Image (spheres, coloured by chain):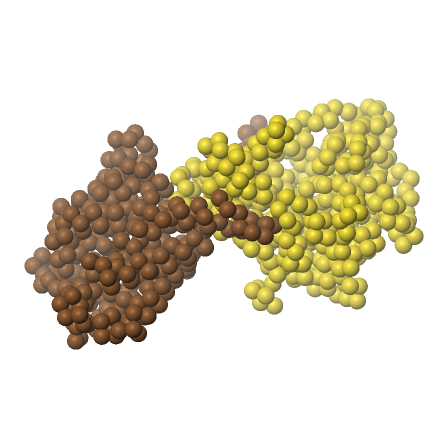
Chain colours: A brown, B yellow
Amino acid sequence: MSEPVYISSSPHIDSGATTSKIMRNVIYSLLPACAMAIYLFGLPGLRTLLLCTLGCMMFEALCNKLGGKPGTLSDGSAALTGILLALNLPPGSPWWLALLGAAIAIVIGKQIYGGLGYNPFNPALVARVVLLISFPVQMTIWAAPTPFSTGFDAVTAATPLGEWKTAVMLTGKLPENLSAGTLNYLTGNMPGSLGEVSALALLLGGLYLLVRKVITWHIPVSFIGTTLLLSGIFWLVDPTRYPDPLFHFLTGGLLLGAFFMATDMVTSPITTKGMLIFGIGCGVLTVLIRLFGGYPEGVSFAILLMNAVTPLIDRFVKPRVFGTMQEVKG
Amino acid sequence: MSSSALKTFPGGLHPPDSKQATAGKPIELSPLPVELILPLSQHIGAPAEACVEVGEFVLKGQMIGRAKGFVSVPIHASTSGEVIAVEPRIHPSGRLLPSIVIKPDGEESWCELFPADPEKLTAAELIERILQAGIVGMGGATFPTHVKLSPPDDKPIDTLILNGVECEPFLTADHRLMLEAPKQILAGINILRKILQVEKTWIGIEANKPDAIALLQELCAGTGIEVVPLAVKYPQGAEKQLILALTGREVPSGSLPMEVGVVVQNVATAAAIATAVIEGKPLVDRVGTISGPLIKKPKNLRFHCGTPLQHLVDLCGGIEHPPAKILAGGPMMGQTQLTLEAPATRGTSGLLLFAKEDLPLRPQTPCIRCGRCVQVCPAGLLPTTIAAYVRLDLIEAAEQTSAMDCIECGCCSYSCPAAIPLVQSLRQAKGMILEKRRGA
């Protein structure tokens, strides 16, 4: 018995779950959406994906080096942020916009707070919103999907939500017929952010995350459910002015946001009850911004606003401690 | 019997149970080792006081350590032989603690035994026999059984629960005992029922032991004892979780099971009670599972209390490589051992040996607030929040966040993707809170 033995307190086994496995699984779950993005938007889409992903990894490495911290690229979180950022940008974004977004996401959205686990806001959404406010023109040029496109001279068009908003603002009514139909919304054959357009690809990825137990159902279900319910109420009140819930469900960034952005663990509540409140809040804000806000799309703002509320939710929403009849208030 | 219909508790998880290596193996008797090391502390409470001297010849079952105080039990020679030392020896807790070392004479000669018919004894006499036999909770907690059976008058007990859950991975000792000595267990249960005068008796068993459930259900038919299959989920065998699953009663925070009229006993304890009362034999041996990836021939062994762990390893085919981790008990709550020279005691439900590659030795990374620890916590705590308070030395905040309600099951640490020592921080918090309370 000359060999040393490990002395530690229990437990002595673990589940095998690691942060990098979680990040890798989320990346896998986004592959269908990435594939659809490249199919629909061609080389410009691929370029945006690569620039954002490699850019985020580069800025992460740079921050670690400057901060004298050990490398964190292997945890996969920087690459994931890059992919999510790309999927939230217009397909034909100029190269500098993508790189600037990557820098904002990693430096301002994440590393300034101390890196993974400490950022209060979803880094990719911080970048998207900063870009949207700073470069409103470039951030709202939507290329119409052109499968296998190789050039950057694509035809531009309005997103369905944009089309609706413009029509309502001009005429006070829904447009006669929105240019794309439900089938096109499902496959993604409509203008929009790189990764938000294909509902089927996003649902497939979301299902993967649920099946692999990377995320729980609480946030996506409460987020989407609230959006459907609230938009449904408005639609019933005035169907000539407000689009139907299916339109809300399939267009814009709802699915991308509900399954992949709002479920970001670092920036969402830690309890399942808190997650439900968070998801409901996201849904309410999304509908209100879409229907009454200045922007046609509200998912990013809704999630960021609820990110800000997360510490508050976590402070007041706690599980019931075993053997106590009332909630222990913090 | 669908799994969703099985009774259980909120939270928890299901680690790979790793029981297949020994679940089908009948209990074997461990032959005597070269020496037996009997710590005077094999239970929670005051250590016993040695009442033999070096050179003295002792008989099997003879009291060699006297109980000191109410929360204490006597220690008995687990075989006949010569006392060769009364000195501090390495204890399963890792400390050097006073122990009596016996060199067996190989005869296994019993001291004079006083068999009895439990029907003819009063509750007080039965409890006295249980105390004199040194019976402790054999699930691992080693709390003196006679104390649990003597609740204050203002705490009426109406329910007895037998814990046959065995939710720790690898361990199959209770499973085998239920299959091989069910009548012994039932005899013990009847003694417990007579002492406690309960209205209701349950035996809770995880549904992954259908053979034990079927056998006990058959034997319990018409006795008023209800055998209930429980969801396969750790820590189903934790006392408060088991009570909730079976009775729907929730033991209030900071209270003992008697607060809700329940006494819980392990099935192995029940069997030991029967042996003690009916045959008059004190607790000198027990069944444990010797397993883990490094053990060549995993077994369920009935060993003498005080058997050095090395002896048990040798009986299971020895080992080729030195172990990286030696565990007394299961992998979720067991205790690491410094050396195989330490003895197996009344509380040793298993001995597990692991190689380095079996151990989770990942470096800690930042909390990503995934909430897994919160979702699995059977106590309804926020483990990562409390761990952060401990890191910041905010002990009062930890106390206000119910750190004292932690049952130390380890589900949080098990499930943490960032390898944060969560339950370890909670133990630290509990220690510091107790220290603060003592100082206040």
On screen, residue B331 above or below B218? above
How many numbered dots are placed on residues in this image? Answer: 0
Q: In the visual, does A1 lie left or right of B88?
A: left
On screen, residue B396 above or below A49? above
Q: In the visual, does A187 lie left or right of B81?
A: left
Q: Residue at x 80, y 63 (%)?
A: B223
Viewer-nearest residue: B298 or B360 = B360
Q: In the visual, does B66 lie left or right of B14?
A: right
Q: Residue at x 41, y 49 (%)?
A: A313
Viewer-nearest residue: B207 or A103 = A103
Viewer can see residue B140: yes
Q: Quarter of the image for the N terminus of chain A: give it.
A: top right
> x%, y% of residue A75?
34, 43
Viewer-nearest residue: B165 or A96 = A96
Q: Residue at x 79, y 36 (%)?
A: B70
> x%, y% of residue A28?
32, 55
> x%, y% of residue A310?
38, 48
Q: In the visual, does B305 lie left or right of A179?
A: right
Q: Quadrant of residue B51?
A: top right
Q: Residue at x 11, y 53 (%)?
A: A137
Viewer can see residue A76: no
On screen, residue B238 above or below A160? above
Viewer-nearest residue: B10 or A34 = B10
> x%, y% of residue A102?
21, 45
